[in-house]
Image (cartoon, grey):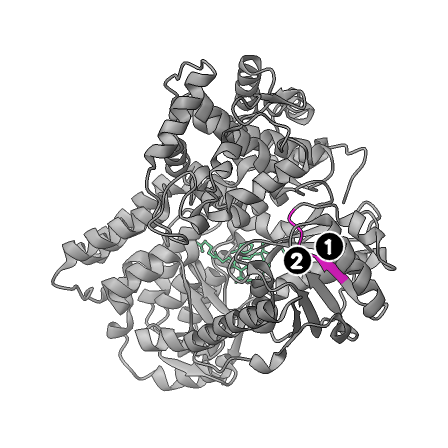
Amino acid sequence: MARYELVKRSVALITLTNPPVNALSSAVRHAIAKSMEHALNDPKVTAVVIYGENGRFCGGADIREFAGPLRGPPLVPLLDAIEAGEKPVVAAIEGVALGGGFELALVCHYRIAHFKARLGLPEVTLGILPAAGGTQRLPRLIGIPAALELITTGRHISAQEALKLGIVDQVTEQNACEVAVEFALRAVAKPLSSRRVSTLTTPCPPDLDALLEAVTMQVKKKARGAMAPLACVQAVRAAATMPYSKGIKRESELMATLFNSGQARALQYCFFAQRTAGKWTLPSGAQWNNSKPREIRRAAVIGLGTMGRGIVVSLARVGISVIAVESEKKLLETGKQMVIGMLERDAKRQGVSASLNLLKFTLSLQDLKDVDIVIEAVFEDMALKKHVFQELSKVCRPATLLCSNTSGLDVDALAGVTDRPHLVVGMHFFSPAHVMKLLEVVCGPRSSSETIATAMSLGKRMGKVSVAVGNCPGFVGNRMLKPYLDQATFLLEEGATPEQIDKALEDFGFAMGVFRMSDLAGLDVGWRVRKESGLTGPDIDPKNPPRRRQGHRYCPIPDMVCEQGRFGQKTGRGWYMYDSPGGTNAKSDPLIQNLLEMYRSRYGIQPRNISDQEIIERCLFALANEGFRILEDGIAARPEDIDVIYLFGYGFPRHRGGPMFYASMVGLERVLERLEHYHQAHPDVPHLEPSPLLKKLVACGSPPVQNWREHIKTMHSHL
Ligand SMILES: CC/C=C\CC(=O)SCCNC(=O)CCNC(=O)[C@H](O)C(C)(C)COP(=O)(O)OP(=O)(O)OC[C@H]1O[C@@H](n2cnc3c(N)ncnc32)[C@H](O)[C@@H]1OP(=O)(O)O
């Protein structure tokens, strides 16, 4: 777990050997402690270098160990001992120095970083804080404002930024270990006292209280209920106001409140869920590690609306040449200007020149003969999409992959009109596609494993979190959205307001409540889907729209809002009113309040007081209930996949872990009981009827979410 060797006759080189990221597992901590003891006691040794094997210094504490009792030497005394030692210790940082790995580097007397190395204290993203002295040493080294920013955001920084901030002593383009050994030899004669960061006085700004107050406010606003960022501010305050010996105790107390919290469990679950999602499998046995993706060099995107533009930018950013196609000259020109503007702004931010030479804009599908992949992003209309796929089938070479950015249409029906159904897959990006990290890769029954592997790998290359899902209306994300939206509108009927529902969801931690989110997405999208599915249309009496359709409860209010031309932010009016079309500042609209009052009185509904608890339970348990059905149906392979989709695509609060993890934290028994209660009260809402899988899991003793898979016996896996 750590190799010890003597180099240059007098330098002890301690190399961490715990692949893949040299995490500080109990065995590694034990090995470091033994190696340091050896080095400090060996008279031949005049200096020490700590290094990480395989070009990675250290990825921090072993997060998997957080779930069990602490074993092996605790980190704080181990690190204190390294710092207090009388022989100079140099950290040779390649790859990453994160969390406990960064804290290990901070106790070394010198730090040499490779120019490609990245450093950071990402503990806050795991619901904890840097509790191996990080919150006490970093402010002493770089001052309160910079330390606060790094610790409360968990941002990784480059070696160059670390040098500027004074975190590292030297940045090198050579082998960091070799440079560190030479550096260590030169450091032998120098005094160490000023190199022990814990002994430094924290440089404090004169307006410390005001600064801490401002950061607290800022962090509170951003954290949406997460506890760790606030605890980080308190720990840094201790570094500013207490000696190290007391500050470290404060750090440890704060860590104790976070370490076993539900939020920390949720955030650590998210870390692993995100990595699990990349490991897709198909019933055929094809999976992420036995299916080779194709290399993609040339891509085409059809349609330069909002989605198409974002996809073009995402592809060009990673060096893929893109042919962008539109059907009309004016649309092409507008799209072209937008794409170029986006890429130029991107390049300006990074201080490089925009890679515009990768782009070609055309009106002709004939130009797509030689591309490796086409991503269709035309209007969400099946007939139009089928027409495009038929044309692509004729034009593109037989090996070209054909992908659709549909948000819910049948991918297999599109495959069926082509001459290569095995090369057809859905690539459902989220708007705006150059910003949002989620990509649902929709596997049709005929999509080949190579096609899926290629789409997943392309998503990863574009920096997306790609999740493989099965083909059904709405796939995973949008299919689950329906019961969630339905509950929100039923609650409106019963007496709630959009503001009340949004506030309850935002207090829960959502980035945006359901009505604000709908306004942003555009209310006309759902209206068109309801029309296409026959739920609404010209046959409906606008004066007296029925509240039961297709055998179930139906809320006509969203249609009534659309009938008034209120399509959300883009029209300046939706569930809220905005200063102008395209405005983002949502204000309550008395017209909506009137509409709700008139509606209730027309149908004789006595509005009742609805608690925030009921809002949360009805919206989120209905959401999770659909997630259970999706697992039963084999549309998602694992609950982690569903959670990742909701975290990255729908603003579900990360410190709640995602809808499925949240349900498990509430307790499946409780979720079942509440769903039964609400279903009894609303028997005409099938989404409130508990799913068989939920009942089965409760009957099996509510296993932890990571074990649900064993209980999911899918008859017809779509994956
Ligand atoms: C007293 C408390 C003291 C300290 C607290 C801490 O140190 S908390 C931990 C802080 N560190 C982190 O948060 C870093 C987490 N890791 C990462 O950000 C990335 O893994 C990293 C290091 C940037 C590498 O990224 P890359 O994309 O190259 O690989 P990937 O993320 O897929 O990881 C590869 C496998 O390693 C596992 N892993 C990574 N870090 C840890 C870790 N700290 N502990 C345990 N396991 C870790 C990861 O899950 C992957 O595993 P796999 O089985 O292959 O999915």
Q: Would you name the residue on which mark 2 appears?
A: 378
Q: Residue at x 31, y 47 (%)?
A: 221
Percent position of residue 582, x then y: 41, 54
Residue 385 shows which numbered tag? 1
Within 8 Å of ligand 1, the CB of disc 2?
Answer: no
Percent position of residue 40, x then y: 40, 70
Q: Amino acid at mark 2?
A: Val
Residue 352 shows which numbered tag? none
**Quadrant in which the N terminus is drawn:** bottom right
Percent position of residue 523, x then y: 51, 42
Tag 2 near tag 1, CB within 8 Å: yes
What is the residue that sits farthest to the left in this orientation? 206
Q: Amino acid at mark 1?
A: Lys
For the record, the magenta segment spans: 402-407
The 10 Å Cα crowd at callout 1, few under 14, some 14 to 19, many 20 or more, is: many
**Quadrant in which the C terminus is drawn:** top right
Percent position of residue 288, x then y: 73, 56
